């Protein structure tokens, strides 16, 4: 029972490079989301999806793109990395937005932009 | 805009003590409130979820209460143990699925 799997666990990038953070869940959850966690600022919602083919912006979407082609996968793309995007990124999923089901989190991706 | 505040930011107690963590939110139009535990360098683990129509939830030594009208929730931990040392986060959600998190309370339980 894998739950929410994030890869990679650690990554160092240079400014301007692009990369994709992967997130997969095997619980058939409709709702998936991406957060970033920074010291003193808590977790902030970047993008979220209420189902395959549907995505929407969260609190801090600039500099990030997402897509949801399948129920299982919700990748987060950094098109041109900036030092301000150095953070810990968490992916979460839940059964449905209207079902009062708890969110399940992955172990995070620790990203450093030099 | 919803704001979630957790007080205190850090708490240190001796083993065996009962303790209360506080969470307050500014917009009472929430769908549910969830308490999480985060160990250092790890992801978040869900502890309790309280629906907006509920007043409290219990799991083992943990009890969470919700007073939606006053915008407050508490997490009560009974007979604390060193293994309870972690950061505890609360999050409130709207029915659209958006969650707003507090900054957390870092708990240290000393043997």
Image (cartoon, rainbow, N blue to C red):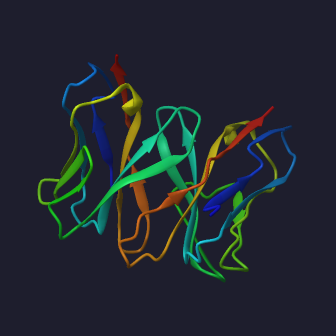
Query: Which residue is found at the position 64% from the left and 82% from the top?
Result: A52
Check the image and report above or below for A107 versus B34.
above
Which percent across, then down, holds residue B38? 47, 40
Query: Which residue is found at the position 62% from the left and 47% from the top?
Result: A107
Which percent across, then down, holds residue B92? 34, 58
Judged left or right of residue A104, residue B93 is: left
Which percent across, then down, holds residue A111? 73, 40
Q: How many numbered markers are drawn?
A: 0
Judged left or right of residue B44, residue A20 is: right
Which image quadrant for residue A1?
A: bottom right
Query: Which residue is found at the position 35% from the left and 72% from the top?
Result: A100
Locate the N terminus of chain B and report the quarter of the image it occupies.
bottom left
Which percent across, then down, holds residue B13? 27, 20
Check the image and report above or below for A92 versus B73.
below
Locate the C terminus of chain B and report the quarter of the image it occupies.
top left
């Amino acid at each position: 029972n894998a739950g929410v799997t994030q890869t990679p666990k650690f990554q160092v990038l240079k400014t301007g490079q692009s990369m994709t953070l992967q997130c997969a869940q095997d619980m058939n959850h409709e709702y998936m989301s991406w957060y970033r966690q920074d010291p003193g600022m808590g977790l902030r919602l970047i993008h979220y999806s209420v189902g395959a083919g549907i995505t929407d912006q969260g609190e801090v979407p600039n500099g990030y793109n997402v897509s949801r082609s399948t129920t299982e996968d919700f990748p987060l793309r950094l098109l041109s990395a900036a030092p301000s995007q150095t953070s810990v990124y968490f992916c979460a999923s839940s059964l449905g937005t209207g079902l009062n089901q708890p969110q399940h989190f992955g172990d995070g991706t620790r990203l450093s932009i030099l | 805009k919803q704001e979630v505040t957790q007080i205190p930011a850090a708490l240190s107690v001796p083993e065996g003590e009962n303790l209360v963590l506080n969470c307050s939110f500014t917009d009472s139009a929430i769908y549910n409130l969830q308490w999480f535990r985060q160990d250092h360098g790890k992801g978040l683990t869900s502890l309790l979820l309280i629906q907006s129509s509920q007043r409290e939830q219990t799991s083992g030594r943990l009890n969470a209460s919700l007073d939606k009208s006053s915008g407050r929730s508490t997490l009560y931990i009974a007979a604390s143990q060193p293994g309870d040392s972690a950061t505890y986060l609360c999050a409130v959600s709207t029915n659209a699925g958006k969650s707003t998190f507090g900054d957390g309370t870092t708990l240290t339980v000393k043997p």
